[in-house]
Image (cartoon, helix red, strand yellow):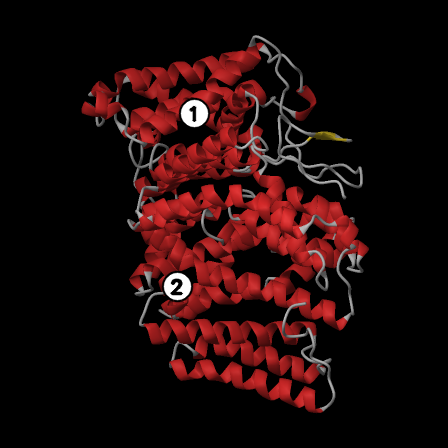
Amino acid sequence: MMRRATSRGDTVTDRSGPVKAAGAILPVRVHTPTGGQTPVQENNRVLKRPYRYVYEVLAIILPIAALIYSLQLLPRFGIIIYKEQYLTLFIAICVAISFLVKPFSKSQVRETPPWYDIIGAVLALIVGGYIFLNYDEIVRSLGLITTDKVIVSVIGIVLLLEVARRHVGWTMVSVGLLALGYAYFGHYLSGMFETRVIRWDRLVTYNYLGTGAIFGTPVYVAATIVTSFVVFGQVLFLVGGGDAISDFAFALMGRRKGGPAKVAIMSSALFGSLSGSASANVATTGMLTIPMMRKVGYSPERAGAVEAVASTGGLVLPPVMAATGFLMAEFLAVPYATVAIAAAVPALLFYFCVYLQVHLEAVKASMEGADATELPDLRDAGRRMIPVAVPFAILLWTLFGWNWNPAASAFAASFATILMSLVLPSMRRPARAYVRTFVEAGEATVFIAIMCAIAGIVVGCLGLTGLGSSLSQNLIAASGGSIWLLLIFSAIGCIILGMGVPVTATYIILVILIGPAFEQLGINKMGAHMFIFYFGTLSFLTPPVCLSVFVASSIARSAPMKTALEALKLAVVAYIIPFAFVLNPAFLLQGTLVEIGAAIIGGVASVFLISAGLVGYLARRVSVVMRLVLIAIGVASFFLTGLHPAFALLPLAAIVLLYGQQKLMGGSAAGAVVGS
């Protein structure tokens, strides 16, 4: 049996030391089969007592507080708190934890925090505690600027920017500082960027104490829904869910043609749909799948690209969608189930395209599957998946069937997982392991909460300056009212802004900046938000700053830019389908049954044509000219289907004609169209 990633117990180490990826919603614990350096590592302190006890208490407070607030337990006892009170305390604890575990610089990692980090943590708690205890008075006089409000706001913003720098470097800090600088100095500019005069005390108090900035919707979602799903993921991994998912993927797909690549697609989709970090997905599954792909004949670049694309695609795949789906539901004021259902078809078409390319390439090159002796037994892996499937069934049923709020659904699934682990000996863990899991859940929440808070600064500054509406007007003017030009400009902007920025923050900023332009041109709201989300996610694959590709190429030991080009080829549908579902909402399951059916059938057939054209194979090899024809018909069919449902028959007819022609010419189609 091959060495496998493990999810049992505490932090697992490989030969290169502890591994845990920053920004992951689910824990990242991987072995390195090759013994090489893991590409994604956190620069955390390993605290000693008593600081470790302080850190653990603070960390465990976060999921417990989220549970109490999300399920509205306090009002049942007559205790009412403002949403902002809860969020202020939540962020204060996140900042304090960051000061304790994140050193000032990479060269200063040590077990005891220096005096200035201790002061930073204490200040964060004092500021949060002051606002929490005095919020009644603060909210009644919110328009009145006082010295105490200015002091706590300045301290709070400075501490927040500093811990953001420690988490992700200067990228997000620069975004926050640029927003603050623009709001303060914008009145010196002219034209569309000119703003009214905004006093600095008004600027800082609005951002830190107001309801539409730092402690707005993004942080609210992070402190409730995201935290609840973090808990679910941590508990699931604790009881062996990660091993069960991975083993099942290997047992089901490993023996097929090009099996390791298909394992990468399946396992990365399963992990990625629950994770908040594309890079962490690569590090988790790629350690196993990339070496196996290399072993059966894939080039280093192709192996890295398959893993990078499959892992990044998990961010747009329900049920979790990197937490951004929950934010989208809040912005659109619709149930999360509506967002998840709308996202299903585009995400499945994306994975179908990746799978088809992998399969056709394997048949074309006569690749075999992995050695059966290296794979888990399918029957045993299936049995181990049953206990894991039960919490997922509870999550989906409560979320979509009973329309519970997402946080309540995730906590219900977590409790079900814990109860099952107490009943089944194979899943049972020591009591301290469960406590440790809640501590790690709190730690895993910190990153995304801090990023959402920084995004909140941008939202607040845009609200003060009105840049969002003016920029939208200028985008419409630049595009001449053309939806196509507006979409192209917006796609480029999403990718550029998303480079090096967490996808959740990218989505928040861009929805405020360019969302109004989509609305003014009458674009479907769901399609507009999903478009921004997709192209923000694609920044992880698009050169030059393609983080997923860099992580995958470091594991595969491949040339990053060549790997990126392979990734673009595999992910081509992800660049096409956002344009398609904006122009034809049937791809988002909005419309009549005929329109939706035509969109799905036409989309599947179009993906088939594009994949066959890119690989150059169907029942036999395809000429260069025919490859171009197939790609052209496939791309055109995505958009023609929206004009009339009958156009869905066009790509189907092209497949039948080409397949029949190749069969008559003697091509062996066995296993080419139907996976083997």
Element type where label 1 sits in the image: helix
Q: In the rendered image, which quarter is residue 293 located in?
A: bottom right
Number of numbered tags placed on the structure image? 2
| The N terminus - image quarter | top right
Q: Is residue 552 above or below residue 130?
A: below
Q: In the rendered image, which quarter is residue 619 located in?
A: bottom right
Q: Is residue 663 above or below residue 550?
A: below
Q: Which residue is mark 1?
A: 62
663, 194: nearer the viewer: 663
Q: Which residue is mark 2?
A: 588
> Of the residues under marks 2 and 1, which one precedes in the sequence?
1
In the picture, measured across the screen, residue 51 lies left or right of residue 619, that is: left
Q: Residue at x 53, y 86 (%)?
A: 653
Where's residue 15, x and y in %?
78, 31
107, 132: nearer the viewer: 132
Q: CA distance from mark 2 to mark 1?
A: 35 Å
Q: Amino acid at mark 1?
A: Leu
In the picture, measured across the screen, residue 94 lies left or right of residue 676, that is: left
| The C terminus - image quarter | bottom right
Q: Residue at x 33, y 63 (%)?
A: 524
Element type where label 2 sits in the image: helix
113, 210: nearer the viewer: 113
Q: Residue at x 31, y 19 (%)?
A: 132
Where's residue 369, x and y in %?
75, 60
